[in-house]
Image (cartoon, rainbow, N blue to C red):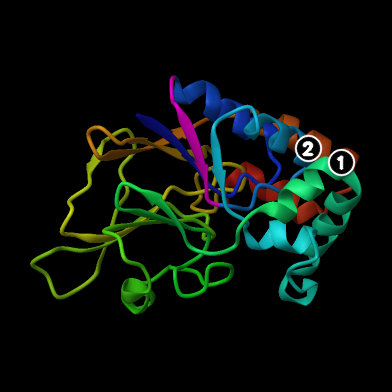
Amino acid sequence: MRILLLSDIHANYAALEAVIKDAGAFEQVWCLGDVVGYGPDPNECINRLLEFDLTCLAGNHDLGVTGKAALWDFTQDAREAIFWTRHALTTFNLDWLRSLPATNLSAGYGITLVHASPRDPVWEYIMTEEIAVKNLDMFNTPICLNGHTHFPAIFRKPWDGLKVLEEHLPVNSPIQFHPYDRVFINPGSVGQPRDEDPRAAYALIDLDQMTLTHHRVLYDVTATQTKMKAEKFPSRLTRRLRFGQ
């Protein structure tokens, strides 16, 4: 079985569609949250995801849009996008966002799904080895898939090691899951990359071979920016898509 792993789409339909076309055949979609926020296509992204056999978590921006996260925890630009999204969403799609779980979720196969971190599923950024270490005892599977940072990354504690080590997440090169390792893997962001690579990021999981392959794909950034300008999104949110920042 092949799984399309997505995170942090942020209402960027052009990026999402490019990812789906690039991925080829898959049976399920696992989304680690932040379907909306920042971008101009919240309804289009939700409607597209609902066409698939979908498992989806709530991210902090999803919670902000539905009123489940305090808006003072967001930047001014993010708040403006949240307010816009609240008015743009259909009633059905807003209710769907409200239904999403915001906790750690077992996906089976020795895999835990979380938006941010096992210790704080909504807000904590796993950006350093130190933070990864502090989260190791917060989940019970060999593998934890997380998003939120918008940076592709691996933090691994080998079965025979005492340290958690940060590793580069290669593109187009399968990573083998080892049942005795403890590992965090972040596939990066579909719609808001921030690792200075503006291409949409995603991963494919092969549950038969127990591998994960990270991918990047070009999409029509200008199309998304044009929509954002038309809706008067904050200029910084519009500009940063071009540079992956």
Residue position for label 1: 90
| Quadrant of the snapshot with the N terminus | top left
Q: Is residue 216 left or right of residue 161?
A: right
Q: Tell me the kind of residue under disc 1.
A: Thr
Q: Are marks 1 and 2 in contact (CB under 8 Å)?
A: yes
Q: Tell me the kind of residue under disc 2.
A: Asn
Q: Residue visible at 53% across and 68% down?
A: 121
Q: Is residue 59 visible?
A: yes
Establish if 106 lies above or below 166: above
Specify the segment rendered in magenta: 25-32
Instruction: Name the one closer to the observer, 164 or 100.
Output: 100
Q: Quadrant of residue 160?
A: bottom left
Picture coordinates of residue 26 (x, y %)? 44, 25
Q: Residue visible at 31% across and 46% down?
A: 109
Secondary element at tag 1? loop
Mark number displayed over residue 43 = 2
Picture coordinates of residue 117 (x, y %)? 46, 67
Q: Quadrant of residue 183?
A: bottom left
| Magenta-colored stretch includes residue 43 | no
